[in-house]
Amino acid sequence: MQKHPDHVPVMFVASKDVKLQKESIMCPRDASLCNVIMQFRKHLDVDAQSPTAGFIFYIKTEDDKMILPKMTEKVGDLHARYHTADMWLNVKIDKEDIFG
């Protein structure tokens, strides 16, 4: 964070049925969570056989609480509130089946 003061470290923690190509990124503080997720979806290995798969993104706190943030919140604000002792913002990814 000293090299890039305008960025925050974000680590993505995937559930068992989600495969990631990349687990961590440095995000601009002023980016919305929605923008970060749109960029990060490129690194998800999505099963082509499952067009009904959706993903839910939670903020995982140090005491293992799951927070469902607004997608319009700034990553810097989320990092300031929910970062861990090692300064990472942990985002948990769960897969959901969506019908309709």
Image: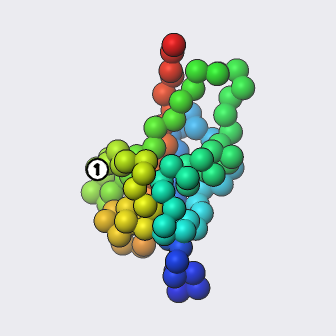
Residue 72, x across and y down, in percent: 42, 51
Dot 1 falls on a residue whose secondary structure is loop
Q: Given the image, on which type of amino acid does mark 1 rest?
A: Lys
Q: Is residue 55 above or below residue 69?
A: above
Q: Is 67 left, or right, of 43 in this rendering?
A: left
Q: Residue at x 43, y 68 (%)?
A: 76
Tell me what residue is drawn at x 33 percent, y 63 percent: 82
Location of residue 51 by image quarter: top right
Type of colouring: rainbow
The 10 Å Cα crowd at callout 1, few under 14, some 14 to 19, many 20 or more, is few
Q: Residue at x 37, y 65 (%)?
A: 77
Q: Is residue 10 visible?
A: no
82 or 5, nearer to the observer: 5
Determine if residue 12 is in view.
Answer: yes
Q: Is residue 98 left or right of residue 68?
A: right
Q: Residue at x 52, y 77 (%)?
A: 6
* Residue 39 percent location from the top left of the image: 63, 51
Above/below status of 19 relative to 25: above
Q: What residue does disc 1 label?
A: 65
Can you give x and y, in whole percent of width and height, for residue 46 in the image?
A: 67, 34
